[in-house]
Each structure stands twice: as C-alpha cells, then as structure tokens.
Amino acid sequence: MTLTRTTCPYCGVGCGVLAGADGTIKGDPDHPANFGRLCSKGAALGETIDLDGRLLNPMIHGKRADWDTALDLVADTFSAAIAQHGPDSVAFYASGQLLTEDYYVANKLMKGFIGSANIDTNSRLCMASSVAGHKRAFGTDTVPGTYEDLEQADLIVLVGSNLAWCHPVLHQRIAAAKEARPAMRVVNIDPRRTATSDLADMHLSITPDGDVALFNGLLAHLADTAHIDAAFTDAHISGLADTLAAARTTDVSDTGLPADVLNAFFTLWAETKKVVTVYSQGVNQSQSGTDKVNAILNCHLATGRIGKPGCGPFSVTGQPNAMGGREVGGLSNMLANHLEIDNPDHRAAVQEFWNSPTICTTAGLKAVDLFQACADGKIKALWVMSTNPAVSMPDADGVAAAIANVPFVVTSDMIEATDTNALAHVLLPAAGWGEKDGTVTNSERRVSRQRSFLPIPSEARPDWRIVSDVATRMGFGDAFAYQKPADIFAEYVALDTALSPFPRDLDLSIFADADYANLIPTQWPRNGHRFFADGAFYHPDGKARMISVTAPKLTKPRLALNTGRTRDQWHTMTRTGKSPRLGAHLAEPYVEIHPTDAAELGAVPGAVIEVQSLYGTALLRALITNRTPKGQLFAPMHWTRQRTTTGTINSLTAPVVDPVSGQPSLKAGAVTAQVYPAAWYGFLACRDHPKAQTPYAAISRTNTGWQVELAGRDIPNDWEAEAQKIAGLHGANVSVQRDPASGTTRVALVQDGEIAALLFVAPRPVVIARSAIIAAIGTDTPSLDALAGRHAANLPDPGATVCACFNVGRNTLISAISAGAGSVTALGAATCAGTNCGSCKPELKALIAEASIPMAAE
Ligand SMILES: Nc1nc2c(c(=O)[nH]1)N[C@H]1C(S)=C(S)[C@@H](COP(=O)(O)OP(=O)(O)OC[C@H]3O[C@@H](n4cnc5c(=O)[nH]c(N)nc54)[C@H](O)[C@@H]3O)O[C@H]1N2
Ligand SMILES: Nc1nc2c(c(=O)[nH]1)N[C@H]1C(S)=C(S)[C@@H](COP(=O)(O)OP(=O)(O)OC[C@H]3O[C@@H](n4cnc5c(=O)[nH]c(N)nc54)[C@H](O)[C@@H]3O)O[C@H]1N2
Ligand code: SF4
Ligand SMILES: [Mo]
C-alpha cells in the first residue's frame, strides 16, 4: 500500500498524516506539528472517507442537474443580481476549511471582479477578535508563537481553551514536555473544569467574561512589583501609561476568584520569565473578545515577553486553514495578503496585479450583519461554501429563516443532507479531503500540503475549480484560467512579491521557487523565524501599542449558557458523525448542569432538560456534574436538525457581537431551564437510517447501523407501529414484551431472519447495556432472546466509549482500575486504552482519580 503524505482536515494543529486509499491512516513521523502523533479524530479519518451521504452531482431545486446547467444558472443569476441591484446585493459565506487556493479564488472573484467585499467566513465566529486584537497591538495580524515555544516555556497559561479536546496533539506535546521537565507550570483559566484542567497546576474558575478584569489586574500587579521591562517598553511600546491607568481602575473581584488564588496566579506569572499565554474561544467568542485579546497582549508587551523562545501570546487557530484564510484576506474587512481595503494604495496595487475591472472600496458585511441583510431582503444571491451556517451561526433558526428569504441560494458541500443545503436552490458537489489538492496553514504559520490519495468520486469537483468555472461564466475567464492548484498558489505567491513595497509581516518569498508537488511543511516567513525578536512592530512608528481596556460591566443572568466542543466530534458532524467509534464517546446533545441547579429543577441523571432563550428552545440530556459551576450550563455545538429534533444549541444563542471584531458572543447568554416532562424515554438500535420525529430524538452511528435516544410527552398507543416508524421498517416481524409492573415495553423487529431493530421504552431514563443491544442488530438471535438481552449474557457491557482507538468503554476501565491498574500506563497495559492517539489520557486519569465523568445515558 502506498501512503500519501497529507495533512489532517480538522483542527488548526495541522498534523501530518500518511493516508492510503484503503483507509490506512497514520501520523506522519516527519511532520513538525505532530511528529507521528494523531488524536482520536485524526486516527478515525479512515472511517469517514466512504461515499455514504455524499453529494455527488449538482442539484437544482432538489433535482439532479448537469454541471453546465448548474454553473450557467449560478453565473447568470449572480450577474443579473449585480446588474440590477449592484455588487453589494450578492454575498459569499466561506470557511476556514477551504484550502488556501480555494479561498484565494473566492476572495479574488468577490473583491476584484464582482467589486464587493461581501465575502465573510465562519472565521468571523472563530478568529475575528484575535485578528482585531493583533492589529490593534502589532499593526498586523501576526501570530508570533511556534509550537516549540510551548515546550520551552516555564509557564503555560491556557485561557478559554479546552486544548485537551480541541488541539489534542498540542496538549500531548505540552503533557510530554511537562513530564520531562516537572518544574514547568500550567494554569487553566476557564469557568468550567475540563479535560484540560487535568494537566493544570492551577485551574481558575473565572466568572464568564472576567478575563479583562483578570489580565488588567495582572498588569497592575506587574507594575506594582517592578516587573515592567522599562528598556523594552521605552524603545518599542506606546500607550503604557494610559493602559496602566485604565488597568488600575479595574476591580479584580469581577473575576469571581478569591484573593489568594489571584495572588498566586499573579505572582507565578510575574516571576516566571518564559510564559506563553495560549487563548482560544473562551477569549474570542465574547462581546469583550477583542479587549480580552489586548488585555493579554498588554501583559506580554509590558514585560517584553514576546519574540523570545518560550515566550509570547499564542492564539491557537481552530480550523485547519483559519490561518490561510487570514493570509489570503478572506474576511470582509480585509483585502488580500494582509493588506487593507481602506488604503487606496493597497487597493490600486491589488487591482493592478489582478488586472481586474474593479476593486471593492469599503469593508463588506460581517457574518451576523450579512445574514441580517439576507433577512432584510438586501441580499439577492448568496453562495455558501464549506460551512453550515444554519447550525453554526448564533440564532441559528433566525439565520435559517434569513437564508430561506434569499431569492437564490447556492451551497458547495461534500455532504448532501445538511441543514444549510436544505435551504439552497442549487447544490454543488465539492471534492473532499483525500480527493482534493492544495495547501493549508496551521496555528504556527506552517504551510503544509493536503494531497489527494483517492479519486474524485462521480461528478464532484474541487472548490477552486467550481469558483473558477462560475467566474469564467460571469465573463472573467482570463483571470480564472487555472488548470491546477499549483497555478493558484504560484499566483498567490507572485501577488505577495508584487506587494513587497508595502511593509507587512506576511512574506511568502520562501515559496517563490517552491516545488509544489513535493512541498515540505514550511513556516512563513522562514522556518523557525521569530517575529518581534528585534522589537520591531508594524505600526507606522515601528512600535507596538498597549491598548487601554476596561473590564465590561457584567450582568450575571441567573442561568447562563456556555457552549463549545466535545473530544470526538467536529462541528456539525457531517464527517466525524460517520464514525461509529467517534459517535460512541458522547452520543447525544447534552447539557452539563451543576448538581445544585439540577436539584433545584428536580432533574435526575439522564433527565431531558428543556433550555430556553429569547431565540428558541432545545431539549438536551442532563449531564449532572460539578465540572460546570452553579448557574452555568454548558452544551456542545455539534448537534444538527439532521441528527436531533431539537438539539441545535445555536437555536438559543443571541446574535450579539464584539463591537470591534464583529465576532459573536457564543459562550454566555441568558437562558431558563426546566425538566422536560417526559412521559416515556426510549432507546432504539437499528440497521437502517432511522427517522425520528419524537420531541427528543438523537441519532448516531453504531458499528451495526444506528442508534436513537428518545423521549416524549405523549405515550404512543401502539409501540409496534412507533418502532416501525422510527426504524423506517414496514412489514417486519414484530415481537413485543411488556412488563406492566415496571411500565417497560420492548419491541423487536425482525426482517430476513435478522434483528433489524430493537426498541426499549421506560417511564424513566432507560438504563440498559446499550452496547449489547447494538451488538444484536444484524444477528439471527431469536427476537425474544434479543429482547431479554440473553444473546449478550456472556458479553460484559463495556459502557460508553472512552478510548475511541481501541473501543474501550468506561465499565471495562473501571473494572481494570478496581483490579489494580492505578496509573494511565497500567490501564494502557491492561486494556490498550490511551496507547494509540492518547486523546483519552485526561479522561483515564480522571477515572483513576475517581473524579468520575458521569455519562448522560448509561
Ligand atoms: N474535537 C474538536 N476539536 C476542535 C473543533 C471541534 O469541533 N471538535 N473545532 C476546532 C475549532 S474551529 C476551534 S475554533 C477550536 C476551539 O477550541 P477551544 O476554544 O478550546 O474550544 P471551545 O470548547 O469552543 O471553548 C473553550 C473553552 O472556553 C471556555 N469559556 C467559556 N467562556 C469563557 C470565558 O468567559 N472565559 C474563559 N477564560 N473561558 C471561557 C469554555 O468553558 C470552553 O471550555 O477547536 C478546534 N478543534
Ligand atoms: N454555539 C456555538 N456555535 C459555534 C461555535 C461555538 O463554540 N459555539 N464555534 C464557531 C466556530 S469557532 C466555528 S469555526 C464554526 C464552525 O461551523 P461550520 O463551519 O458551520 O461547521 P462544519 O460542520 O465544519 O461545516 C463545514 C461544512 O463544509 C462541508 N465540507 C467539508 N469538506 C468540504 C470541502 O472540501 N469543500 C466544501 N465545499 N465543503 C466541505 C462539511 O460537510 C460541512 O457541511 O462554528 C461556530 N459556531
Ligand atoms: S490534533 Fe487531531 S484533529 Fe487536530 S490536526 Fe492533529 S490529528 Fe487532526
Ligand atoms: Mo473555529
């Protein structure tokens, strides 16, 4: 089997992968991001490359169409809207999951040829506050950090980052460095305790949005304890006095942290020279996101802890090409290659290079405003590429209605059934990971190749080609006559050379003579280059600016909703949702709720909770845990209307944004909650794709088909019919067992001599060995035995999966622990858990420490 060297399509760590057409996936030992490591998602990539559910040909109004018809329709409709209503009447909504080449051509078409800047991307929901904060401080959007800094630091402060689940390989690198050098300290600043807190010497359970107060307090402490580097600030920094004055007005009690904890953190930070502050969505996705970023940067600038090995602020990027999108200028307030829209010289230079008929002159609409403009009828044609805004935008139901209000909606996706595709007039089939070729840039500015190792299936096409084909039909063929991604990459590098008179951090000259086919992972401007080492920044005076920020006035709702990610799912689950082993980690939309809040609501473990906001309602499984503080709920963002009836968390989030960056606040919103008065709970395992319409339903893949968690208010009068309806099976042989004493009902559906579906219903949350039920699907076990669970008598129930690589369940681990496996290493030896990708090590440690992780539905 020949293995192709490529890059993981998930997070911004950007791990190198060796991949084979048979589904073989290995970490690339030579890639400097991961040196052979992969996390559970990366390791399961082989399970996601099948064609099940793929969009394989263009569709117009739900009917199959050929490419020429679809491309003509898209080009003509966009051209007509532009002619009639002007360039700002159309918009693209793109993604940090596009490759650099795709992104470059989409940006070029909108800004240089259509002449509008109405191209925004899901990076608005992700990195916009960091971009804005960097620009305010450095004069450029520069991420100065490298992964080696994390290993060289003496103190790593993780702010609003669940690195263990969201950047697992970086987490593992830090864990390994800490093990080798136990003096290294890690501080985790997050309202919740997470798997990341496990690595930390100190977990600061900060009040939501208390971060500005915390870092302002730190700055004041640094000044009071003579830790300001006067030589550095005199020479290279402006704004110190004002910033410090503003910081001193801060009331640190706004952090919600006790004085001794604050002092311990301040002292540790002040007295450790090599500090890296890593930050992510707990910082960016906030109404004070940009101020949070600057509050962090202020501390690094004041102490000169930037531009040196083992030091510096480090905004880790989320998506595989979030950084590449920033480089090509794919946000509505950027031009191209780190140039500015409102600078006429920049515009002229880009227009000249593109030889384009026009160029945008003002910033375009940012994501929230863009969808508002759709709702207001101002957008006549919208093209969504490689993102699923009907799920991932705040006020997702409002956004879905806004998209439905646009007269002409095009989507490019690799999967057919998505919540956004359901609203589109034209669906264009995109080639996916493994099929397409191009480049991505990771969190440490390292450009790596994604290479194809699979044929492009059926009629799918790579995104760069789809955009170029439409551009050509709009009359711009000369400027979009690319034959292959290498042509685009070469043009992008040449543009950078043409822009060299403008001083910028972006410098792609290292790629000028690049051998694209054999490109090895390379950082810009040069491997190992240290930005700001010489104290030179990019504001006109060559200095960095400290920015005065004041802590926001916090209104503390009685119940706040925090949202984020789980270890084994990626965003809206179109790809990770295909993998049974990834689905087994947490198979339902759940809500973490503190035991006191749960008691107040009267929620028992496994209850369904109805969470409401001004914008909508969601039903979520209660996961009662003291990891989330009292008064704060946490729910994952992954579940869609394809997989749940009412589990889409963005139905509840508000479209309020940071005033500087336009990034939505997705981590703190006021909600109310009550126990959903379910009259019945159910669990169904089945062979074929189920259809669930019950009020609470969550569908997930298993290795024998599918499973559905169910709950409802009204008890169906015919469970046999209900089971057939959900399992999508009619004419099966039905067996039923009823136990009037406990109120439970069990239904087996047998087709072609095989168990095709099993349904278990109870008046309380169903307690049953789900893995044994799932294992019976597709077997010829007599149906009554299957209902009694007899087929599984000699199979112990492994419980919910903890180790996705070796499918090791919680119960297996607990019995190994009680049999004496007292360390992560011993557990690995006994069960294999944690010995491949290592993503579950924090959970293994937590299990050992008996800080047990309650699973929603066991
Ligand atoms: N498994 C997995 N990994 C992923 C992704 C995925 O979907 N799944 N997505 C990728 C993408 S695009 C991104 S952007 C990254 C995101 O990576 P992260 O930012 O690490 O992930 P989140 O879970 O969104 O949020 C991080 C933490 O912020 C905390 N937080 C909430 N409010 C506050 C606050 O006011 N202050 C502080 N200090 N913390 C707060 C939350 O409790 C949460 O634990 O992950 C990337 N990696
Ligand atoms: N409540 C809440 N909401 C959030 C967040 C949060 O923390 N909380 N985080 C936000 C953040 S940081 C992000 S990045 C967003 C992510 O949100 P989205 O970008 O909406 O989520 P994805 O599921 O990654 O969507 C990618 C889509 O592209 C498709 N796709 C995959 N590969 C290709 C390809 O090669 N070409 C094309 N054309 N399509 C492809 C996939 O099938 C999928 O439909 O969510 C944001 N929303
Ligand atoms: S850490 Fe995991 S998801 Fe992120 S790039 Fe590496 S293998 Fe992929
Ligand atoms: Mo993101």
Image (cartoon, helix red, strand yellow):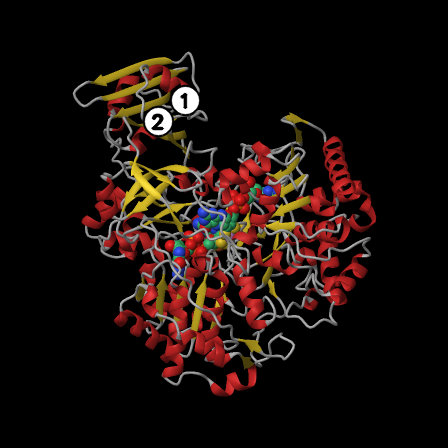
Q: Nearer the viewer, residue 219 or 741?
A: 219
Left or right: 509 with respect to 93?
right
Q: Residue at x 50, y 76 (%)?
A: 306
Q: Amino acid at mark 1?
A: Ala
Instruction: Give the class, few, some or many, for how many residues have Cα within 10 Å of label 1's Cα (few <14, many ≥20).
Output: many
Residue position for label 1: 727
Residue position for label 2: 684
Image quadrant assignment for residue 698: top left
Q: Measuring from the top left, give residue 236's x and y in whole percent.
A: 56, 82
Q: Measuring from the top left, give residue 352's x and y in whole percent.
A: 81, 61
Q: Amino acid at mark 2?
A: Leu
Q: Earlier in the sequence, mark 1 or mark 2?
A: 2
Q: Residue at x 30, y 51 (%)?
A: 631
Mark 2 element type: strand
Q: Measuring from the top left, give residue 349's x and y in whole percent.
A: 78, 64
- Up-down: is 841 above or below 216? above
* Pointer 1 with pointer 2, Cβ within 8 A: yes
